[in-house]
Amino acid sequence: MEVSVNKLETLPDGISRLQLHELYVPNNRFKEIPDEICSLLQLKTFSVGRNPLKSLPDKISQLTGLRTMFMNSCQFDEFPRQVLQLEGLKELYMRNWAGEGKPSPVPKDIGTLKNLQVLDLRSSGLESLPDGVGELEQLRYLDISRNRFTSVPEQIMNLPNIEKLDLSDNNISSLPLSLCRLAKLKDMAISGNPLTYPPADVCDKGTAAIMDFLRRELKNMEERELRKVFHRFSQSVTESSEVEDLGGALGLTADEMINIQASRNTKPSSQAYKVLSKWKETDREASMDKLEKELSESGMSHLVEKASRIQSQPAKRPADTSGGPPTKRRAAGGPSSVNSEDKLAQLQGENRTLKAQVQKLQGSQKPRSREPGDKPVVMLLNDEYGIRKGGISTINREIGCLLVSKGAEVLCTVLNATQQDKDDAAADGIRLIFPATFERDPRKPELHWLTFDHQTRYPDLPSHVDFIVGHVHITSHAARRIKDRFPVAKLVQVTHVMPEDTSHYKGVERVLSIGKESDNILDDLRHADVIFSVGPLMYDYYKHQTKQLKLPHHKLLPKPSNIFINLHPVPPLGTETKVVLSIGRVKGVERLKGYDLAAKSMWDVMKELTNTKWRLRGVTKEDFRGSQEIINANKDKVEFVPFTPLEYGTQEELRDDMGRADVVLMPSRAEPFGLVGLEAIAAGVPVVISHKSGLAKFLKTQDPEFDRTIVEIGDDDDKAAQTLSKRIIDILKDGPREFQAAQSLKKKLLDSKYWTESHTNVLQTFGLEG
């Protein structure tokens, strides 16, 4: 049950009688949790975040079946220790539990939650972690972003199962080499830190590259340290007999020993070092500990004593000129045996930390990301930001602009973008995210990069996202997969297509794939938190298809862009020249979009009105010849039908097209919605729309006057073409009256503000005011 963002202060009596498995009450006004909730013994998920709670009831510990708990951004006086008794918890979201601007420390005995797999500590004012965090051996995801850490907490190195780690937006200047020992760590966010190590070119390549770099650095550093220790040990070897004993203990061959001892003038200490170096070449596990063991097993107590003495002596610290990673200096009075990584790099870490602090005081540090508040971070997933192709991209941009207008932080993935796209996004307040490309890789960006290769192609996605928006079927699967990188984010899917309607007109292969394509869409929707469907036709279809999912499902009615609303077309001037405008791709969708019907009807139109021009916006140079063949495929019934091909253009170009058109033609056999037709009505241009489109279904719910835009497209193609041509000819012949009717429809459409409820649902879904 979800009752979030409802200004509730209490829950109705009798809630304890419900067999609830999930209860979400965030963003309300609860000052205390009713005891009745503690009787919901079937509860698996409980969310109380963003409520002015001071404490939790003691009886909440009775919820032994609880697996997921959200208690972020409350106002607890102290950490509610009842939570630590919920030993079955697997996910705990406790960021900023004390409230905005207050430190929210982690309890020392957090380690009692042995089954915890997800721990969210973001934005909690933390500078350190208690040792108990290192006891969470089952932890897979840890988020400590937007805190005050100056180094990676050492407790993290004790988490053997950690897979995802968010360190972003702290004050960390370098990553420790020991991080590479976390074998299961595959996803690490580090953006928003003043990192100087590893180098930026390594960090830019993502987690895998960082881990490889740290492993190489650790290996090189350990080898350097081992050589130093070997050198010190070899200095204690003063007899040739000791050299021979050492070689025998370490398994060197007679030939290898002969080569080492060939020069009689070489000191035993130098020969001993050569023995150790040869041993190291052949034994990857070579170390001082293993040396002691080998010598002891060979009964060489005198050499064992020397090795042990070398082990216990701290090495002299060299000047820090390596630029390597930071580690910790052994505390005074601490144990004398510390690992070589700790020995080498403590001073480097202190130098970098001090440098970062100085930079911060000087104001030169990279700005911190926005502190969390009530405004969400939303990531739109799409292949483009431009709206030249209309449809999905136009609606994607409309959603983004609507959210930005209410203060949301909005980002949008793209495969590429023109300068106009970049300028539009900047003007809209939306940040574009581009894929990583690699030198000498000739491949062009494609949707698979976003769907299946996002870890490598989009390594620098934001460290935190509240909502992910996917578009069926272009990016719905990508959204589902990318959500794994943001377990706390809600997934919003927007449906744009209905294969059972449209694929029948796209060839045999597409017809045969309808079942699989529909199943894939439903599989993506099954993982959504909220569904929006564009227009009433699509909403009705997916409401039926998803009825067993019981997900929030809203109708999305797009508002026409202002660029069309602000168009004031000039009335017909009585010229013989007439213009019919069609918009959209031809090749591959000719029957779906009704271009074969349009070609037949335009032949009749041009016979009667000889100066009529047919313009097709959306025909690329590559598709022109194929489009021409499709339109003139009925040579046995009609002669050559001339048309003017126009490539995909900007909204400004499309607006100008409409301003010069006498009628916009949309004879689709199946159209889930038909946004371009809606934009033409908003522009005040006469329109002819197929009754089979989702737009026609929407218009029929408005004023009856909109019926004049709708034409019945039957199954008999010849009759359908005749119906179309008759309506087009009527419009062209009676231009002034049709123009006045179009102006009336424009006013009725805009005065209705039909989009208001839809926009309110969008804003409320994203936690914003409607």
Image (cartoon, rainbow, N blue to C red):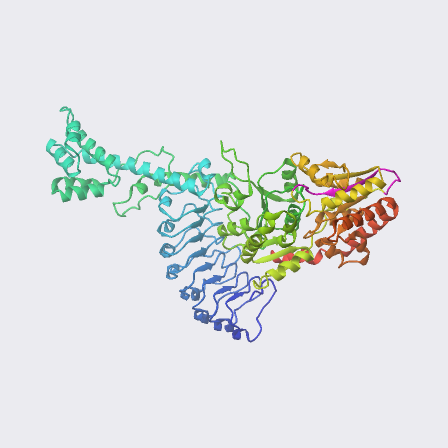
Kindly report the secondary structure that dominates the magenta region of the rendered protein.
Answer: loop
Quarter of the image for residue 220 reads top left
Instruction: State the image coordinates of residue 756 (x, y, percent, origin top left).
Output: 71, 56
Quarter of the image for residue 546 reads bottom right
Q: Is residue 574 magenta?
A: yes
Q: Is residue 555 above or below residue 192?
A: below
Query: What range of the chain is rendered magenta?
Result: 571-587
Q: Viewed as shown, does residue 103 lie left or right of 291?
A: right
Quarter of the image for residue 585 reads top right
Q: Which residue ends up furthest to the right in the rendered image?
A: 574
Q: Is residue 389 magenta?
A: no
At horizontal 48% and vertical 63% (from top left) the residue drawn is 77
Which image quadrant: the N terminus?
A: bottom right
Instruction: State the image coordinates of residue 511 (x, y, percent, origin top left).
Output: 61, 51
Which image quadrant: the C terminus?
A: bottom right
Q: Is residue 494 above or below residue 648?
A: below
Instruction: State the image coordinates of residue 436 (x, y, percent, origin top left).
Output: 51, 38
Residue 99 appears in the picture as rendered: yes
Residue 648 appears in the picture as rendered: no
Q: Which residue ends up furthest to the front in the rendered image?
A: 636
Instruction: State the image coordinates of residue 612 (x, y, percent, origin top left).
Output: 82, 39
Query: Which is nearer the eye, 37 or 626?
Result: 626
Query: Which is nearer the eye, 86 or 473?
Result: 473
Q: Viewed as shown, does residue 708 lie left or right of 339?
A: right
Query: Which is nearer the eye, 634 or 181?
Result: 634
